[in-house]
Image (tube, rainbow, N blue to C red):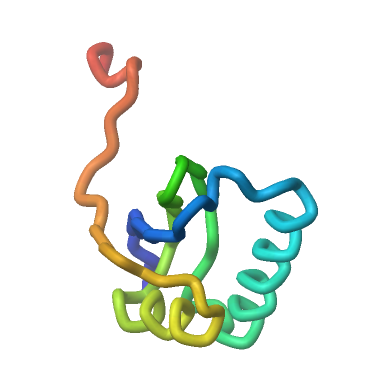
Amino acid sequence: MALRRFIIERDIPKVGTLQKEELKGAAAKSNETLRQLGSDIQWVESFVAADKTFCVYLAKDEDVIRKHAEISGFPATKITEVQKMIDPTTERG
């Protein structure tokens, strides 16, 4: 089964003020949870704002994303499946 792309919005107060070591610890915690869940979920990247993160994941379904949030302790405030992607080169295709 192909993995689908999701954007996960996480409300985390003051996340934008976390220092490098704190972010490193958060990444380690997330990665450990991903190892526990197996090949049904992959973390692609995250964007950190003042009080939120926006994470890009590949996953089998929303349930495995919710399970990751539950185990890791990082809230999944809103989960949106990506239907299509475009970029500046789309106009040429």
Reply above or below: 39 against 84.
below
15 or 70: nearer the viewer: 15
90 or 82: nearer the viewer: 82
Residue 33 x, y percent position in the rendering: 61, 80
Residue 60 x, y percent position in the rendering: 37, 75
- Give the side of residue 15 with respect to residue 22, left or right: left
Quarter of the image with the C terminus in it: top left
Reply above or below: 83 against 50.
below
Total labels: the figure holds 0
Quarter of the image with the N terminus in it: bottom left
Residue 68 x, y percent position in the rendering: 48, 79
- Give the side of residue 9 with respect to residue 35, left or right: left
- Give the side of residue 66 with respect to residue 29, left or right: left
Image quadrant in which you'd find residue 8: bottom left
Reply above or below: 27 against 64.
above
Residue at the (28%, 38%) spot, across then down: 85
Residue 27 x, y percent position in the rendering: 67, 62
Residue at the (28%, 30%) spot, across then down: 86
Residue at the (66%, 70%) spot, across then down: 31
Image quadrant in which you'd find residue 61: bottom left
- Return the residue found at the far right: 21
